[in-house]
Structure formats: structure tokens, C-alpha cells
Amino acid sequence: MQYLSFYTLPVWELFPKIGKIATIKLLLLVNLHFQIVMTLATKPLSNYIAVVFDFDDTLVPDTVDSLLESLNIDALAFRRDRIQPLIDSGWDDILARFYAIIEESKRQGNKITQEYIANFGKKLAPFDGVAEMFDRLRQSAYAINPKVEVEFYLISCGMVEIARNNCIAPKFKAMWGCEFHYGKEGEIEFVKKIVTHTEKTRYLFQLAKGVDNAPKDDGQTFVYRDVPAEELHIPLTQVIYVGDGASDIPCFSLLNEQQGITIGVYKDSTAQDWSQEIEISQSQRLMNLASAEYSEDSELMRSLTLAVESLAKKISLLELSVGE
């Protein structure tokens, strides 16, 4: 009984020599210490999962080839005769592609305009099953943990304005890619924004830090500044990246380094052909490589579902560590 009555005393009487105020300060410091220890012992919690897609040959057919075909141009011959010579003379691949397209548009009386690109994007059909994929993945996460939210992003080295006008555009929280500058009549005149293979990783950092928090006037500073882990919108460990080719290798490499999930897709070929063509190094190896088929029972859809479910379970585990 004496033992119990010891704890019924006012807390400052336990330390009579240092006084009431000093005792309270001491206990606050002890409490803060334990809060810090608990914070450092467990990982920060984010209830978000990001699924990031390339566009061309990942969700839709190659947009350059499709755009050229809409102009009654043989895409294979155009690449061989108009684009490849520029690359062979030292041009960057992406700049060579857009320069050749701009020159062809001028040759046809400025046929490619902002309106033409918008209409082309509206007519471009995604691969079968893509339109239904978004809700399926969200439902998979919800079944594991209703608090988990799945967000979709698109990072492309192609013409992002085609993607922004496509039927699946409303499914994405943000889209990044190359953009044209237009003349007075809406004709394409020059490229005003380039997203290179390596620069794709910049947008992975940006979505991790939160696209809504990015300063309007200085995205570059925002992207590369050091953000504490607990302030991240989505840690890269909770990012799934899906891409089809060489432009995606820097993102594969970054996410492998950060313990994210990488999935490769191929179209009109085999996994062996893709591996030989892309030449993935050890640091760029994928979690899985599947055909770009998004039907519910396809290997790619099963891969995406398992990836989302595994991250939803991981988030549930982290919730336990913060007492939720």
C-alpha cells in the first residue's frame, strides 16, 4: 500500500529539491525524448501509392508512328530517311525526332497544329484493358486497406499534349513530357520543353515530394532540395514504375536503388527480344517483364495487382507502428 501511495503524490513532490516548475520541465523533456526515439525507430507513414507509366508503347501505340500514319506517311521510312541521318550526324534522338516532324509539317503547309494534335490524342485508342485498369488497381488497394490511396502519374519523352487529350487523361494526377511552341495560326514551330531519358527521374522526385507543393516559379529548386522523409507525399519505396524501353532505364535504376518496384512491358515481341534490345544491367533489373496486355487475367495485370497489394500491406504494417 505504501508503494501505491508513493505514486498518488503530486508529481513535483517526487523531486522536492528541484521544485515544481523544474520537475515539469524535466518530465516534458523526458516525454519529448521518448517521442523522438519512437519516431526514429519506425519509418514515416504515407498512405499513398504511386503507379507511374510511360506512354508510348506502354499504354498506347507509338505516338510518333501513329501521328505520321495519320498524315499518310510511312513511319518506318520516315525514321530511316529523315530522323536517323540527323542522329548519325550528332543530333540528340529526341530533338532529331521533333525537328523532322516540324519540318514535315511545314512541308505539308503547317498541317500539324495544336488542334490537330488535340484531335489526334482524342482518337488514339489505348491498349485493351487500360481504361479499366485504374479502378481495378484502386479496388485492390482498398480491399487490403481502405485508407490507402493509389495515384497515377505519366512521364513521357514523347508528346505529352497527345496524352493530355486522350480518353485516359482524367485518371492521372499529373503528366509530364515534351511540348511544342505554336505559331500565330496554331502551327508547331519549335519544341519548348524536352524531357530526356535521364530527366524522367526528376519527375519521380517531384511526385514523391508532392506535385501540389511545387513552387510555380522554380520547380528545379523544389525537385532537388533535401526533404525530410516524414515530409514526403509518397516515398519512392511506394512507387511502381511501368515502362517499355531505353527511355525508362534511368527510372528503373533509381527505383531499384530506392527499393521501389519496376515492371517492364513489351509489345509485338518476346521477353527475350526485349532483353537483348534494351540491354538491362544488373542495377536496372526489373521485378517482372510482361506483354503490354491489360486484361484482368493477363500477366501484366496480375503483376500490377500484386505490386499494389504488397505496398498496401506494407502501409498497414507501418500504421501499426504509429498506433493506428
Image (tube, grey):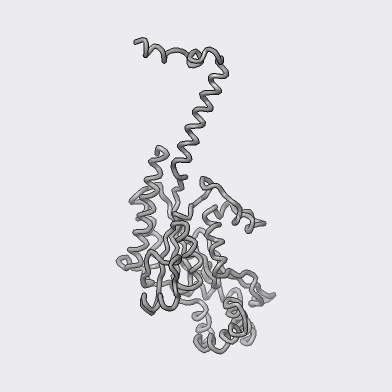
Q: Quadrant of the N terminus?
A: top left
Give the x, y percent position of residue 94: 58, 76
Check the image and report above or below for 207 versus 200: above
Q: How many marks?
A: 0
Farthest left residue in view: 297
Where is residue 93, by image quadrant? bottom right
Residue 314 higher or lower than 275, as above or below: above
Q: Position of residue 68 (x, y in %)?
A: 53, 83
Look at 63% across and 53% down and name the residue there: 215
Q: Please tell me whether residue 185 is drawn above or below residue 141 in the rendered image.
A: below
The residue nearer to you, when weighing 282 against 96, is 282
What residue is shown at x 34% (from left), y 50% (from top)?
Answer: 144
Image quadrant where one finds the C terminus: top left
Q: Residue at x 54, y 70 (%)?
A: 197
Q: Quadrant of residue 117?
A: bottom right
Answer above or below: position of 92 versus 282.
Answer: below
Q: Observer-nearest residue: 41 or 128?
A: 41
In the rendered structure, the answer to whether residue 108 lies left or right of residue 303 reads: right
Query: What percent of the width, then of the height, locates residue 220?
Result: 63, 59
- Residue at the right extreme of this rendering: 184
**At 53% from the left edge and 71% from the top edge, which residue is drawn?**
162
Q: Quadrant of residue 298?
A: bottom left
Q: Position of residue 203 (x, y in %)?
A: 55, 61
Q: Is residue 285 left or right of residue 203?
A: left
